[in-house]
Amino acid sequence: MLILSRKTGEKIIINGNIEITITEVRGGEVRLGVNAPKNVAIYREEVYHKIQEENAKALVEKAPDLSKVGLKGKKKK
């Protein structure tokens, strides 16, 4: 993990196209501004984990029971 020190108004550039700006530091809280391409998803960690949990549940709940599905097709002669 890379650890950097920044002051309010200073920036970090990631991969040349993602810009993180320190907008405010107050007490134990830091406010960040993120400027990134629209195709880059940005989430707070707790939101990201919740999305992953919901997606995993949806896969399990909506998975069809394929054990009762018969295979149909042309018979070889």
Image: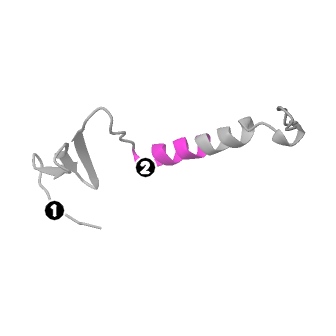
Mark sitting on residue 5: 1
* Screen quadrant of the N terminus: bottom left
Residue 70 forms part of the magenta stretch: no
Q: Are the two marked residues, 1 and 2, in contact with CB atoms closer than 8 angstroms?
A: no
Considering the numbered disc 2 on the image, is that residue within a helix, a strand or a loop?
Answer: helix
Of residues 26 and 67, the one nearer the viewer is 67
Image vertical order of residue 2 relative to residue 32, above or below: below
* Count of numbered marks: 2
Q: How crowded is mark 2: few (under 14 residues within 10 Å), some or many (20 or more)?
A: few
Answer left or right for 49 relative to 73: left
Q: In which quarter of the image is residue 59?
A: top right
Residue 37, position as x, y percentages in the image: 25, 35
Considering the numbered disc 1 on the image, is that residue within a helix, a strand or a loop?
Answer: loop
Q: In which quarter of the image is residue 18?
A: top left
What kind of colouring is applied to the model shown? one colour
Mark sitting on residue 35: none
* Marks 1 and 2, the one that precedes in the sequence: 1
> Residue at label 2?
45
Q: What residue type is labelled 1?
A: Ser
Residue 60, position as x, y percentages in the image: 71, 43
Answer left or right for 35 relative to 55: left
Answer left or right for 24 relative to 43: left
Residue 52 forms part of the magenta stretch: yes
* Screen quadrant of the C terminus: top right
- Main secondary structure of the magenta stretch: helix
Q: Which residue is drawn at 89% across and 38% down?
A: 68
Residue 30, position as x, y percentages in the image: 25, 50
Q: Which amino acid does label 2 sit on?
A: Glu
Please state the extent of the stretch shown in magenta in the rendering.
44-54
Of residues 18 and 73, the one nearer the viewer is 73
Q: Residue at x 60, y 40 (%)?
A: 54
